[in-house]
Amino acid sequence: MSDDVLTFDGLRAALGRVADRLEAARDDLCALDAIAGDGDLGVTMATGFGAIRPLIENPPAEDAGQLLSQVAMQIGKVAPSTMGTLTATALLRAGTKARGKTDLTAADLAEMLEAAAQGMKDRGKADVGQRTAIDVLVPAAAAAREAAGAGESAAVALTKAAAAGEEGAAATANMEPVLGRAGWIADRARGNRDAGATAWATILSALAG
């Protein structure tokens, strides 16, 4: 990443970090998911992002939008679970905002995160405050938008987005679950961070560096 933009090669490197960190976090995410879910989220995310390595190491894509779209489709193919599908949708929506671009500014990143959040809302029929990854993506997008408005670099925008996303993930521990399995075993979920939100906080942290 240069001072001002996230280059195409920088995006490739960032996605590689995402794959590495989700693999490292696999067992912890599974344990967190097992508290009020099926216990397989860590495997889903590590498998999905592990499968994108050929796309980022020898990319057939020519721009950021194409790369994200290909990454999304691969994740949707190899990890066709609820979170895999939601993640693929978020990345597809982000990719539509990066079509034809090889250098991404802070404003581009903000727009991409906003699109990702909206895609996850649309696909998952959920919103802020319902203890999901949306509680990470929405504040992350807002932080990136604020950074862009202040004339900050892409690197700063991602760093601030990651920090806001981590705060959002931590806040899910105090939210009442209403969706999925966690909704009907709320007592077990309460007091623990949402696994999907934690996975997405990990993604944003890795993208930021």
Image (cartoon, helix red, strand yellow):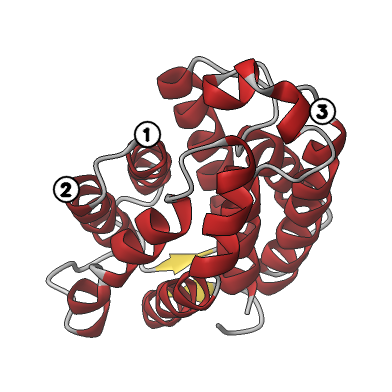
Badge 3: residue crowd in 10 Å (few <14, some 14–19, many ≥20)? some
Secondary structure category for the residue under label 1: helix
Return the residue at label 2. 77
On-image quarter of the C terminus:
bottom right
User: Of the residues shown, which amino acid type is indicated by label 3?
Assistant: Met
Q: Residue at x 62, y 16 (%)?
A: 184
Return the residue at label 1. 82
- Which disc is residue 175 wearing? 3
Q: Which of the two residues, 50 or 122, is positioned nearer the viewer here?
A: 50
- x and y percentages locating residue 120 in the rendered image: 48, 30
First reached walking from the N terminus: tag 2 or tag 1:
2
Badge 2: residue crowd in 10 Å (few <14, some 14–19, many ≥20)? some
Is the residue 72 above or below the residue 171 in the image? below
Q: Residue at x 67, y 64 (%)?
A: 158
First reached walking from the N terminus: tag 3 or tag 1:
1
- x and y percentages locating residue 204 in the rendered image: 61, 61
The nearer-to-camera label among 2 and 1 is 1
Q: How many marks?
A: 3
Q: Is residue 110 visible?
A: no
Secondary structure category for the residue under label 3: loop
User: Of the residues shown, which amino acid type is indicated by label 2?
Assistant: Lys
User: Of the residues shown, which amino acid type is indicated by label 1?
Assistant: Thr
Secondary structure category for the residue under label 2: helix
Q: Residue at x 35, y 37 (%)?
A: 89
Is the residue 28 above or below the residue 194 in the image? below
- x and y percentages locating residue 115 in the rendered image: 50, 35
Q: CA distance from mark 2 to mark 1?
A: 12 Å
Q: Which of the two residues, 197 or 11, is positioned nearer the viewer here?
A: 197
